[in-house]
């Protein structure tokens, strides 16, 4: 299993729960030297392999794929992403560089990692790859909150891209799914300015693991929330 963005929050909890189930986990992080929580989880667990990876760096993605050339990977979870600088994503102060940086991390990065590790998936048994979406990427729910234009666009683009990827790879036996974590109490949620309280990281990840296990080709073209509900596209 390959999980990106594992230094904290949802990604870290994915590593913790999957490793506890006995999975071998390749856990990527931009800077392993400062990923103290991940290092603590991995300590004494040979089934967790920490790898340096910035999903906006194409050369780094290709290099990591080459490092694991010939090794089967059953599941890929493209968790890495960024909320970005929120004030720079508001109408009246839109920043082009910030907008593109969020798209690069949240959409392109997930697609590029999936592309680079396709042969590894084909060598696996489960052959599942997932993109991490959000209710903020739903065109049916845009009336709920404003702002976050770059983040919204990145998740809407991910939804479209991964549905297209699902259609392209289905004949080869690779299941491409789209999952969403719900409103989770993480550093990212606090940075967003959300006034309420989110669900726990443990609850979110536990639910998404069940969604991943139950995902079929028939349900893979939907955006499925951690609780199994479908988010309107």
Image: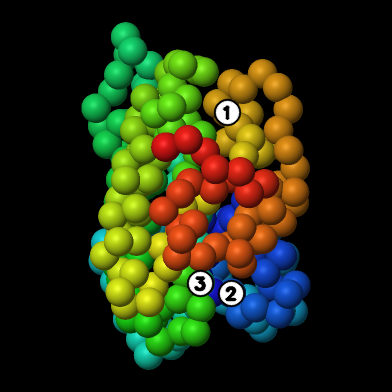
> Which residue occupies 38% across, 45% down?
159
Image coordinates of residue 194 in percent, x first then y, are 62, 22
Residue that carries the numbered disc 1 in the rendered image: 191
Residue appearing at x 30%, y 50% in the figure: 161
Task: Please give left or right for residue 50 compared with residue 21 in the image.
Answer: left
Residue closer to the observer: 184 or 223:
223
Circle 1/circle 2 CB separation < 8 Å:
no
| Quarter of the image that includes the C terminus | top left
Vertical comparison of 96 with 128: above or below: above
| Residue occupying the point 33% across, 13% down | 91
Q: State the SS at label 2.
A: strand
- Residue 25 image label: 2
Q: Residue furthest top?
A: 92
Q: Quadrant of the N terminus?
A: bottom right
**Label 3 sits on residue:** 75
Q: Earlier in the sequence, mark 1 or mark 3?
A: 3
Q: CA distance from mark 3 to mark 2?
A: 10 Å
Is label 1 in a helix, a strand or a loop? helix
Query: In terms of sequence position, does the residue under pointer 1 or pointer 2 come before the other?
Result: 2
Q: Position of residue 97 (x, y in %)?
A: 26, 32
Which of the 4 quarters of the picture holds residue 181?
Answer: top right
Q: Secondary structure at mark 3?
A: strand
How far is the residue under mark 1 from the one under mark 3? 30 Å
């Amino acid at each position: 299993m390959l999980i990106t963005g594992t230094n904290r929050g949802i990604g870290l909890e994915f590593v913790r729960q999957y490793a506890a189930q006995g999975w071998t986990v390749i856990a990527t992080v931009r800077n392993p030297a400062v990923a103290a929580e991940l290092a603590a989880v991995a300590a004494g667990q040979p089934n967790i392999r920490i790898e340096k990876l910035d999903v906006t760096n194409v050369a780094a993605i290709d290099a990591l794929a080459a490092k694991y050339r010939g090794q089967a990977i059953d599941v890929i979870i493209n968790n890495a992403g960024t909320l970005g600088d929120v004030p720079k994503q508001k109408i009246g102060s839109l920043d082009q560089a910030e907008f593109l940086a969020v798209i690069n991390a949240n959409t392109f990065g997930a697609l590029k990692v999936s592309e680079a590790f396709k042969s590894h998936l084909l060598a696996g048994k489960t052959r599942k790859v997932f993109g991490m979406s959000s209710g903020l990427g739903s065109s049916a729910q845009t009336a709920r909150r404003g702002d976050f234009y770059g983040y919204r666009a990145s998740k809407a683009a991910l939804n479209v891209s991964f549905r297209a990827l699902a259609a392209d790879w289905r004949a080869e036996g690779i299941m491409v799914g789209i999952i969403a974590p719900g409103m989770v109490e993480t550093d990212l949620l606090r940075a967003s300015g959300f006034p309420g309280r989110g669900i726990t990281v443990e609850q979110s990840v536990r639910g998404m693991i069940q969604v991943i296990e139950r995902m079929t080709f028939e349900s893979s073209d939907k955006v499925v929330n951690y609780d199994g509900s479908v988010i309107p596209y």
